[in-house]
Amino acid sequence: MAGLLRIILQRLALGVVTLFAVSIIIFVAVNALPGDFAQAILGQGATPEAVAAIREQLGLDQNAFTRYVTWLGGVLRGDLGVPLSQALFAGNFGTTATGTDVITVVEQIAPRLKNTLFLAGVSAAISVPLAVGLGILTALYRNSAFDKAMNVSTLSAISSPEFFLAYILILFLAVLNPIFPSLSNIFPGMEFSDRLNKTMLPALTLTLAVTAQMMRMTRAAIINLLASPYIEMARLKGLSPMRVIVTHALPNALAPIITVVALNLAFLVTGVVVVEVVFVYPGIGQLFVDSVKIRDIPVVQACCLIFAAVYILLNLTADILSIISNPRLRHPK
C-alpha cells in the first residue's frame, strides 16, 4: 500500500508540473493570436490613439512576463480575472451593460462547464457500455459477419468528421424523422427530461466519435488474452465462451481498456467545440469560440486551462486505475 501511495503522489506531482508547463504554452499561444481585444472592439477604422487608450485601460500594454505572473497568481488563488468586455464597460460606466455587478470569468464559465459536463456524462453513459459490450461480442464472434460489420461501421464513424456526423444525425433524427430537436436550447431551471431530450443529438454525435476506438481496444485486448494458457484451461473445464471472456479474459484486459476509456472521456470534455457550435449548445466549447472571436483573453485562457486540467486529470486517473488493476505495473523492469 505504501508503494502504491508513493506512485500516486509521484503521478500527481508530475501532473502539477505538466499543468504548469501547459499554462506557459497557453499564455504564449493565446497572446500570439493576431490582433487584440481593443482592435476587435473598435474595428479596422480605429485610430492608434484610441486602441492604445483601451489597451492601457485593460492592462494589455504591460509586458508579457508581468501579465503571465499576474494571471498565474490569480489562477492559484482561484481568480481567473474579469472578461475584457465587462472590464471595459465597467471601467467607463461603473457597471456592466445589463446594469448588474461585474461577472467574473469563473461566474461566466461555471454554468457553461456544467452544461458541457452534463453532455459529456450523457455521452459517456451511452458510449462506454456500448463500446465495451460490442468489444466483448466482436471478440466472442471474431471473424464472423457480425464482427466484420461492426468493424466497418465503427471505422466509418471514426473516419468521419464530427460536423459531418452531426449533420447526418440532424437530417435523419430531426428533419426526416422529428424525434429530437436540431438545436440544443439549454437554459437554467429546465426539466431534466427536456434537458436530456435537447442534449441527445450532440450526445449521439459524440458517442459515434468515441465508441469505435474503445470498442476496438476492448476487442484487441481480449483477443490478445484468448491464447493464454489459463484461458485454455478454462475452456478445458467446459466453461462457455462468454463466461471465459467475461470472468477470465476481461478482468486481465482492464488496464488498456481503462486507458482508452479515460482518453475518450477526456475527449468528451475537451473535444466538444465543434459539436457545441453545430448544435448551438451553450457549453464551454461555444463560449471558447465566441471569446476567441473578440480576443477576450482571460476567458480564452481560462477555457484552455480547464481543457488541459481535465485532460491531465483523466490521464492521471487512468494511469492510477491501470496500476491498481495490474499489480505488475508497480514494479517496472
Image: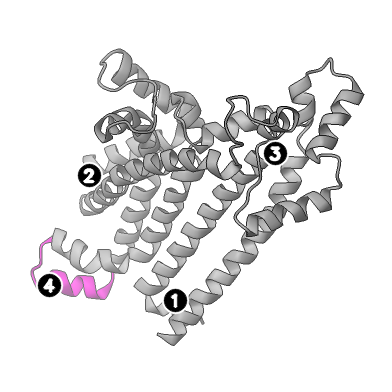
Amino acid on which disc 1 is placed:
Leu
- x and y, in percent, of residue 198 in the image: 33, 27
Residue found at the very far bottom of the displayed protein: 2
Amino acid on which disc 3 is placed:
Ile
Location of residue 31 (image quadrant): top right
CA separation, marks 2 and 1?
34 Å
Which residue matches tag 3? 297
Q: Tag on residue 144? A: 2
Crowd tier of the residue under label 3, counting other residues whose Cα lies within 10 Å: few below 14, some 14–19, many 20 or above: many
Point out the stretch of residues depicted in magenta. 227-240
Crowd tier of the residue under label 1, counting other residues whose Cα lies within 10 Å: few below 14, some 14–19, many 20 or above: some
Crowd tier of the residue under label 2, counting other residues whose Cα lies within 10 Å: few below 14, some 14–19, many 20 or above: few
Instruction: State if disc 3 and disc 4 touch (CB < 8 Å).
Output: no
Which residue matches tag 4? 236
Instruction: State if disc 3 and disc 1 touch (CB < 8 Å).
Output: no
Crowd tier of the residue under label 4, counting other residues whose Cα lies within 10 Å: few below 14, some 14–19, many 20 or above: few
- x and y, in percent, of residue 34 in the image: 78, 32
CA separation, marks 4 and 2?
23 Å
Amino acid on which disc 4 is placed:
Leu
Instruction: State if disc 1 and disc 4 touch (CB < 8 Å).
Output: no
Which residue matches tag 1? 329
